[in-house]
Image (tube, rainbow, N blue to C red):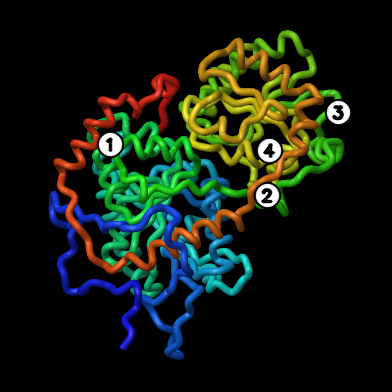
Amino acid sequence: MVLPRFARPDSRRSDPISMPGHLEAAAIQQREGQIAPRLVAASRLRRSGRKEPDVVRILFFSSVYPHPKAPTCGTYNRELCRALSERHAVRVVAARCWWDELRAGRRAKGPPHADSTGVRLAESRGTGQSTDPAVDHVPYFVPPKLLRRHYGWFMRVSVQRRLVRVLQQFAPDCVLSYWVHPDGEVGLWAARRAGVPAVVIAGGSDVLIVTRTAARRRRVLKVLCESQAVVTVSEGLRQRVLALGVPPERVHTIYQGIDASVFHPGSRRDARRQLRLSDHYRVLIWVGRMVPVKGLDVLIDAFRLAAEGCGSLHLYLLGDGPLMSVLRRSVEERRLTDRVHFVGSVAHHDLPTWYRAADGTVLSSWSEGLPNVLRESLACGTPFVATDVGSVSEIAAPAHSLLTPAGDVILLADAMRRITEPRYRRGAASYRARTWADTARDFSELLAALSPVWNGRTETVDARSIDDRAARADESGSLIAAATAAGGRNV
């Protein structure tokens, strides 16, 4: 009898995560890129009794995923799951924080959350066609801004019943999670429960900001060190993860993609007509969530300076968030209501029209990973201005972008005026975007590299080892960049 490659350990064993202080990690024994055969999805055979060597059953878990009441949240994760579904079977469990649900309910009247018991879309089965995977939207509870180091426990207890049901029904070959803590902690628990590898994606602030406090840093390190693979969305973020003491052979950079069929150059005049914007305006757009780490107070001050010397300059803010009312008051106090426009949340498929209509996209963040907003902008032929934080410099080039230090209002204002010059738009026209198919291919190769070494066995990583790694990271001074010290995010 041929045993499957993803042999599950004895299901009768006790659940290690329920025992205080008991940490486990599975050893990865190959170097990055050394082993890349096709992954054999052998944890389950088809009813016909035949193996399907190319199809992997992937359970994706994250709280950053589109929701009926938050359709723009985590659209990049939906695109990733869609791309993976072309080759693999994908199932999604999307956690949603109770206070986000409460705020959404206050803003929008209508039928109650239609998904408290789980939305069912057509389950993807690796048929070669991109489809929306089946999604279970599950609410979870955490105390706002309190006991943050225990957020993983709160999230796991909230979603455990649904997650166990999905594990039983779907029988995944691996668990892929996005956002290291608390989401990655729950993903790691689910992978252990199923006896399959855990892969966690670090998005940016979960490594750059969450690790500021010692207690949460240990939680992040635990997930990073015990996952079978860690994926970062940029090389700069990979270096931050390595500085935390995570073994380099486990850490892989896989850049996110864009949908080239949606985000591509087009007529600026047609886009402006569609949006009813004057052809005489110089248009800058900002896209994102209105939270402190995005540095929108700096953006408003910089725009005020830039607008003084350019009467046709207009700024359009695409997005919403807890700071919207504060920003509106700030704009009113600076008498910019006729120049700064609050558009609100914009559907992802409508963003290309805005990018094409704009002379430039601007981000003023204190901290970022590698923002897909900037790559989508370039894919539509629109240059960008951004603060030189995180891994933004990895996609910047003098021909189509300008970078400024975080928090520097004067330099940001100058860059906002300059980016509207035609030469930058000509430079952006030559940008060639990476697609989600490229990203899905890299994930498939990573999963294939995990297959030959995974045997379901785990090894203990004690708390002292975690503390030692955290102490070394503190001594090296690599955890907190000066640019992020003034920013923050409710994570």
Which comes before the other along the chain, label 4 or label 1? Answer: 1
| Residue at x-position 53% and y-position 37% | 370
Quarter of the image with the C terminus is top left
Which comes before the other along the chain, label 1 or label 3? Answer: 1
Q: Secondary structure at mark 1?
A: helix
Q: Residues within 10 Å of mark 2 (few under 14, many from 20)?
A: few
| Residue at x-position 23% and y-position 72% | 9
Identify the residue position indicated by label 2 in the image: 349
What's the distance in space between the residues labelled 4 and 1, CA to CA?
33 Å
Q: Secondary structure at mark 3?
A: loop
What percent of the width, then of the height, locates residue 208? 39, 33
Amino acid on which the number 2 mark rests in the picture: His
Which comes before the other along the chain, label 4 or label 3? Answer: 3
Front-most of residues 40 and 350: 40
Front-most of residues 117 and 447: 447
What's the distance in space between the residues labelled 4 and 3, CA to CA?
19 Å
As drawn, 463 above or below 212: below
Identify the residue position indicated by label 1 in the image: 217
Mark 1 or 2: the one toward you: 1
Q: Which mark is residue 377?
A: 4
In this rendering, position of residue 462 left or right of residue 60: left
Q: Residues within 10 Å of mark 1 (few under 14, many from 20)?
A: many
Identify the residue position indicated by label 3 in the image: 279
Q: Secondary structure at mark 4?
A: helix
Front-most of residues 489 and 400: 400
Amino acid on which the number 1 mark rests in the picture: Arg
